[in-house]
Amino acid sequence: MANKTIEVLHERCMGAGNCVEVAPDFFDQDPMDGTVILLHPQVAPGDEAVVEKAANVCPVAAIILHSAAS
Ligand code: SF4
């Protein structure tokens, strides 16, 4: 099964940090302005739920989960 990939719309991010709380293996925050840093764009099937949850708690919908082209 193909892995999904994460896209972050950085210009939308307002540094709320919700994604980092939910999925710290995938997201970090810039120490200067608090905006999101994507650590791992590739999502293994077993990690999809936590990344979807992180996308859902982002108040500005800056996290998009893509199905990888096979
Ligand atoms: S939850 Fe959304 S707004 Fe907050 S840091 Fe993550 S991407 Fe940015």
Image (tube, rainbow, N blue to C red):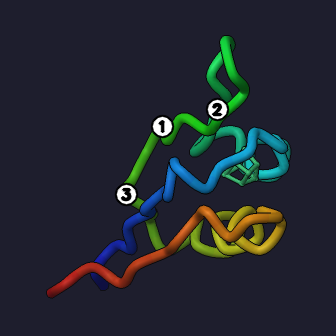
Q: Is residue 62 above or below residue 27?
A: below
Q: Secondary structure at mark 1?
A: loop
Q: Which residue occupies 61% across, 38% down?
A: 36
Which of discs 3 and 2 lies nearer the camera? The answer is 2
Amino acid of disc 3:
Gln
**Label 3 beta carbon less than 8 Å to ligand 1:** no
Question: Which residue appears at 57% of the width and 45% of the height?
Answer: 26
| Mark 3 or mark 2: whose residue is earlier in sequence | 2
* Labelled pair 1, 2 in contact (Cβ < 8 Å): yes
Callout 3: SS: strand
Q: Is residue 48 left or right of residue 56?
A: left
- Pinpoint residue 59: horizontal percent, then vertical percent: 82, 64
Number of callouts: 3
- Mark 1: amino acid: Leu
Q: CA distance from mark 3 to mark 1?
A: 9 Å
Residue at the front extreme of this rendering: 11
At 18% from the left and 84% from the top, the residue drawn is: 69
From the viewer's side, name the closer residue of 61 and 5. 61
| Image location of residue 57, percent across then percent down | 83, 66
Upstream in sequence: badge 1 or badge 2: 2
Above/below status of 4 relative to 50: below
Q: Residue furthest top?
A: 32
What residue is drawn where x is 73% and y is 62%?
A: 54
The residue singled out by tag 2 in the image is 28
Residue at numbered disc 1: 39
Amino acid bearing label 2: Asp
**Mark 3 nearby-residue class (10 Å; few <14, some 14–19, many ≥20):** some
Q: Which residue is mark 3?
A: 42
Asked if labels 1 and 3 touch by Cβ distance under 8 angstroms, the answer is no
